[in-house]
Image (spheres, rainbow, N blue to C red):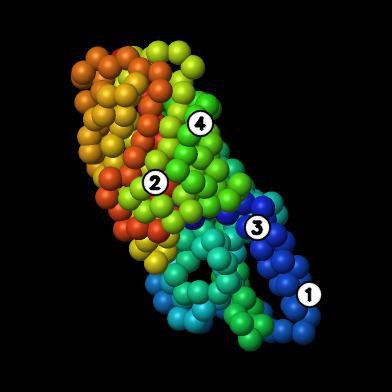
Amino acid sequence: MLRNTCRASGAAAIAVMLALGLMAQASATEVRDFEEIAASPVVITPDPSGRAAVLEVDTSIDVACSVVYGTDETFGLIAVDNDMDGGAHADHQPVLGGLEPDTTYLYRLQGTAPDGSIYVSEVMTFSTPLAADGPANLALGASVSGVSSEFSDAFAAENAFDGDPATEWSSRGDGNDAWVEIDLGTPQALGDVVFRTRSMSDGSATTARYRVTADGVEYGPFPADQPFGDLGELGIVAQVLRFDVETSTGGNTGAVEIIVSAAE
């Protein structure tokens, strides 16, 4: 599952400040090896779509972490470790968005400690998978007709239906009461449904089970992050779909992406 995203306006501002901070301090501060503070191996998990990836690494001290990446050493893209309230910490899960499937990327980790120390890793690589073919996602770009709450404009409900795994919908502390409703525009024959939960690095905001209501008829609960075929097997045709969190670890629950495939 994907964790917090870095495309928000606040995240972009943090990215700019981190980059400027690195340039401004480089002449006065020795740049140190990121390995000095790395407390775990770097793990990159590409999204099956090939359009995003989660980087996970722990550090022995609190740092504000960023990742520069691109198809060559000019990079051109940056992701920041933004846990909503920002700041330095030791558990890092920046999301690298704007990727292309079946492509090799170069990346470099950068961390700034509260004392001004700058840590930079060597340049490393990862590759994205081929995008998997499958039935059309009926929820892509669907109209959001209702939502329990949104943490901010940067975490709007529409983000769960935009096909971008580097964006997400977050409620404002709704926990098990979080819900979102969409209108497909016309009645559609439904296939598999996947509710891809968002999650915070402190373990909160993770949805375990959710329910689906299709034109007023409730189904579930179903496990998050796993496709289920019940709707397709039942031959359900519906236009308005509501997704309710059933059980979670509480907090700012929501979804990275909610996929509703067309019946095959």
Q: Say which quarter of the image contains residue 232.
A: top left
Indicate the amino acid at tag 3: Gly
Residue annotated with mark 2: 178
The mark that comes first in sequence, 2 or 3, is 3
User: Nearer the viewer's eye, disc 4 or disc 3?
Assistant: 4
The mark that comes first in sequence, 3 or 1, is 3
Left or right: 75 as drawn, with respect to 81: right
Where 235 sits versus 203, above or below? above
- Residue 41 drawn at (x, y percent): 40, 68
Q: CA distance from mark 3 to mark 1?
A: 21 Å
Query: As rendered, which of 249 and 257 lies closer to the eye?
Result: 249
Image quadrant in which the C terminus is located: top left
Q: Say which quarter of the image contains residue 79.
A: bottom right
Label 3 sits on a secondary structure element that is helix
Q: CA distance from mark 2 to mark 4?
A: 14 Å
The dot on residue 24 is 1
Residue annotated with mark 4: 144
The mark that comes first in sequence, 4 or 3, is 3
Dot 3 surroundings within 10 Å: few (below 14), some, or many (20 or more)?
A: some
User: Nearer the viewer's eye, disc 2 or disc 1?
Assistant: 2
Given contact means CB atoms under 8 Å apart, are the residues at marks 2 and 3 in contact? no
Where 57 sits versus 210, above or below? below
Q: CA distance from mark 2 to mark 1?
A: 43 Å
Indicate the amino acid at tag 1: Ala
Residue annotated with mark 3: 10
Label 2 sits on a secondary structure element that is loop
Q: CA distance from mark 2 to mark 3?
A: 23 Å
Residue at the image point whose x is 76% and y is 71% from the top: 23
